[in-house]
Amino acid sequence: MDRPALQRLLADIEASRVDVVVVYKVDRLSRSLLDFAKLIEAFDKHKVSFVSVTQQFNTSQSLGRLVLHILLSFAQFEREMISERTRDKMGAARRKGKWTGGVPPLGYDVIAGGGKLVVNAEEADQVRAIFDLYLQERSLLRCVELLNGRGWRTKSWTTKKGTLHTGSRFDKTGLRGLLRNAVYIGKIGLKGQLYDGEQAGIVDTDVFARVGEMLAGGQKDRSRAGNKHGFLLRGLVRCVACGSAMTSATSSPRGKSYRYYSCTAVRRRGNAECPVRAVAAADLEAFIVDRIRGIGRDPALLQETLRAAAEDRERDKGQLEQERRMLQAEHQRCRAEARRMPAPALDERMVQIETRLGELQRSLTAIEGAEIDPSEAAKALAQFDPVWDALVPREQASLLQLLIERVDYDPREVAITFRPTGIASLAGEQRSAA
């Protein structure tokens, strides 16, 4: 239902601009019984007829509506069966030990016809060395620093279409995935179960088990993870020096707790990766809050902020419109190919495109409605102080998430980028509260 063209059609129907809706087949409108029932209800409400070019039925009669629902039921059944067959086929292939696609792991290449992994001798030696290195160092971060220091990289591979994907520097997440990959002991995983794979193993089973035990012992339980330490800028701070995100972290030396934002490049690849290590959370948060308070008190600064927000709005709007045009063109190509040769993959891609087009339309609508009067913005920001002081940390964090798109941190300068809709949303909320 959330497709831009369909939403425009419904808007035209509500405006009494449409007499008849014509489709090639019923399933081109929807393959969901529930969604289709909503559409038919909207058609009936506004006295709009519905016609399928290749299927004969009359929705003005009870028999015609029954035929329509039967056709739609089969369309939904076909969609679900295609998905089930695809999952079952891939599951059966993995139970037989076959490689079902994706990025080949370091140490293996995919044979020309696909479907099977063969050992790459040179990379296999690297993989065994990586396992031995972890057993020696017992630290993912230390291993990452050593591997990148040697100039080693992750897997480079070429797709069937000839596109080359070059390897990148190691990080903790990628290294952990490599050390846990059962492919290296000749197995294929499926839903937590391991099956004998067609590929030859390149790592000793005992070595793999020891590494797995060490990783499990050092793994933190993230199920209870949350913002219990009251980070106000969580997910907003970026490091200017290397372009990485800065994540929230805590430490407790000598029993005293400290909060700070640390560069993820340093956390993943070591201290040599970036000159910016960390910044105290309390200092950065106080600076940002004071800056927002200052905007409400200084008319010139307010005008500058609104001007920058307007520029960001226009930039984001242009990017969204460009992406929308590209997706609309791709959708037309997929639809033309589907008419010549129907294929489940094309239908799935068109659904993905339509979903994304709906998201883009909502974003564009929000941006277009985000312009506010400077006096309203000044009033909203002037009320920031009493509102802020009355909030608990969780609510303060939500308010900053509403206002701020990102914070670019450099030890010499901190830049705040406000959300194109942020100040407008704040003013709207205060009007609603009033």
Image (cartoon, rainbow, N blue to C red):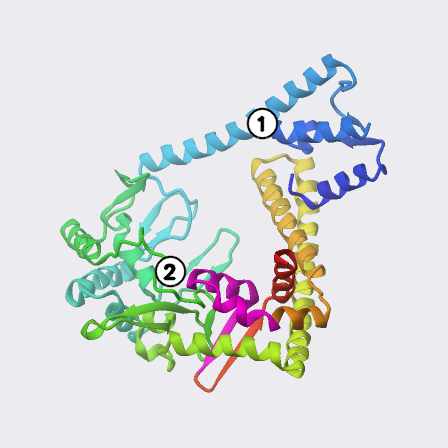
Residue at screen point 32% across, 70% down? 267
- Rendering coords of residue 249 (x, y %): 33, 68
Q: Which label was assigned to residue 113?
A: none
Principal secondary structure, stretch drawn in magenta: helix
In the image, taking residue 9 as reference, residue 362 lies left or right, namely: left
Q: Is residue 141 visible?
A: yes
**So how many labels did they put on this image?**
2
Q: Quadrant of the C terminus?
A: bottom right
Q: Which mark identifies residue 76?
A: 1
Which residue is at a point 31% across and 38% down the rendered structure image? 97
Q: Is residue 149 above or below residue 186?
A: below
Query: Looking at the image, can residue 152 be seen?
Result: no
Element under label 2? loop
User: Which quadrant would residue 278 be assigned to in this image?
Assistant: bottom left
Q: Is residue 300 above or below residue 189?
A: below
Q: Which residues are magenta?
A: 382-410
Q: Is residue 67 magenta?
A: no
In the rendered structure, the answer to whether residue 173 lies left or right of residue 358 reads left
Residue 144 lies, with reference to residue 157, above or below; the image says below
The residue most toward the bottom is 412
Give the mark nearer the N terminus: 2 vs 1.
1
Position above or below: 258 against 48: below
Residue named by callout 2: 227
Counting from the top left corner in percent of width and height, residue 408 is at: 50, 76
Callout 2 amino acid:
Asn
- Closest to the observer: 371 or 77? 371
The N terminus sits in image quarter = top right
Q: Residue at x 21, y 64 (%)?
A: 129
